[in-house]
Image (spheres, rainbow, N blue to C red):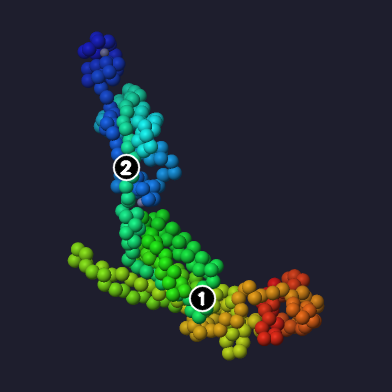
């Protein structure tokens, strides 16, 4: 075949030799400029209708340019190199080199554009800014107030729950956390997320749980409700020592329905419905447990040095207790010494 333009004899494309064809054809193109939306609050970038987090703005610029590179239908981009130079804070002059294949030809095409970063608010941050929420999780103590440590732990658990959910959904966020009535009011973006958070707290702490809904109005013919989840934590925590009918028990675990208790004196285990523990008396926490030196051991009892008076005392071993060290952990209560464990 002959090139109709230069007369060279070789394979032709639209009756042109490769050189003449490439000279008069382009396969790629970029718009004169591209706007890239970035949220001014969360710094995420809008990529094809989705908000995406980027560590490095250059990667966002690259993806945005790549997504807007127009390619002729009969060609394929094998590789795209871009070089971006900052014009000013938030705009870049971008030089792109696209390696394009057409039939058996390959050519590197250069093109330029300007990418402007437009700072805006994404819908999620708009909602957060506007204090948008659909549910409130009210976390409340029973009896004693939360310690600072515990208050922080509750907030940390709540935030972790929300963070985890937000990985899958941009609708998942906490609008605010307010201290209220010795606990927290957590304002949660959706009803579903408020519910899963409330349930997690219930299950961790063996808390009581109530929900109530109030009508907020109508939108597009649908009733809009706001739901409040009340999570009332029991008076006891795991590792607390509680008194029931004059006997002391160690709280071993708590759950949504029951708590596992170990009677300190005899070592027998009990599973108790949390409804029976609502008003239980907490006589000690893990901070009240002290060490006692073991002076001797018999078949059924230990000889210990009393941690306060240093007198030698004898304490019956709870069933199933096997000593592993030179000291044991004990709890002192009303003149008695209880063995907690190793
Ligand atoms: Zn030619
Ligand atoms: Zn945002």
Residue 229 appears in which quarter of the rendering?
A: bottom left
Compared with 299, 126 (above or below) is: above
Q: Position of residue 340 (x, y in %)?
A: 67, 77
Q: Position of residue 113 (x, y in %)?
A: 31, 31
Residue at the extreme bottom of the image, as rendered: 245
Residue 195 appears in which quarter of the rendering?
A: bottom left
Q: Position of residue 128 (x, y in %)?
A: 35, 58
Mark 2 sits on what residue?
118
Within-10-Å neighbours for mark 2: few <14, some 14–19, many 20+: some
Mark 1 sits on what residue?
145
Compared with 186, 122 (above or below) is: above
Residue 159 appears in which quarter of the rendering?
A: bottom left
Q: Is residue 303 visible?
A: no
| Quarter of the C terminus within the rendering | bottom right
* Kind of element beneath mark 1: loop
Within-10-Å neighbours for mark 1: few <14, some 14–19, many 20+: some
Q: Is residue 289 left or right of residue 34?
A: right
Q: Position of residue 40 (x, y in %)?
A: 36, 48
Q: Is residue 155 visible?
A: yes
Q: Nearer the viewer, residue 120 or 163?
A: 120
Q: Nearer the viewer, residue 337 or 155?
A: 155
- Say which residue appears at 59% left-offset and 85% top-offset: 243
- Say which residue appears at 73% left-offset and 71% top-offset: 324
- Say which residue appears at 56% left-offset and 74% top-offset: 238
Q: Mark 1 and mark 2: span between their CA atoms?
A: 48 Å
Compared with 324, 331 (above or below) is: below
* Kind of element beneath mark 2: strand
């Amino acid at each position: 075949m002959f090139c109709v333009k230069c007369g060279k004899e070789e394979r032709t494309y639209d009756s042109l030799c490769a050189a003449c064809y490439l000279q008069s054809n382009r396969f790629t193109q970029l718009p004169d400029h591209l706007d890239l939306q970035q949220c001014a609050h969360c710094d995420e970038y809008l990529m094809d209708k989705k908000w995406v987090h980027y560590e490095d703005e250059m990667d966002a610029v690259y993806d945005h340019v790549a997504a807007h590179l127009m390619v002729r239908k009969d060609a394929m981009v094998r590789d795209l190199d871009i070089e971006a130079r900052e014009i000013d804070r938030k705009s870049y002059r971008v030089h792109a080199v696209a390696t394009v294949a057409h039939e058996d030809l390959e050519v590197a095409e250069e093109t330029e554009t300007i990418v402007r970063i437009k700072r805006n608010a994404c819908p999620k941050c708009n909602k957060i800014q506007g204090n948008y929420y659909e549910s409130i999780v009210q976390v409340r103590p029973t009896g004693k107030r939360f310690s600072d440590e515990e208050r922080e732990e509750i907030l940390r658990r709540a935030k972790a729950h929300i963070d985890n959910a937000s990985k899958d959904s941009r609708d998942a966020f906490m609008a605010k956390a307010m201290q209220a009535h010795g606990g927290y009011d957590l304002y949660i973006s959706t009803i579903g997320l408020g519910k899963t958070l409330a349930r997690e707290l219930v299950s961790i702490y063996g808390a009581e749980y109530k929900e109530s809904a109030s009508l907020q109005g109508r939108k597009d013919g649908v009733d809009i409700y706001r739901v409040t989840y009340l999570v009332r934590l029991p008076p006891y925590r795991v590792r607390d020592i509680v008194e029931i009918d004059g006997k002391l028990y160690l709280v071993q675990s708590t759950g949504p329905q029951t708590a596992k208790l170990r009677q300190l004196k005899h070592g027998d285990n009990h599973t108790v419905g949390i409804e029976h523990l609502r008003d239980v008396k907490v006589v000690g926490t893990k901070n009240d447990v002290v060490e006692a030196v073991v002076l001797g051991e018999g078949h059924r009892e230990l000889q210990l040095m009393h941690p306060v008076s240093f007198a030698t005392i004898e304490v019956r071993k709870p069933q199933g207790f096997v000593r592993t060290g030179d000291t044991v952990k004990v709890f002192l209560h009303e003149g008695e010494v209880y063995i907690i464990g190793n």
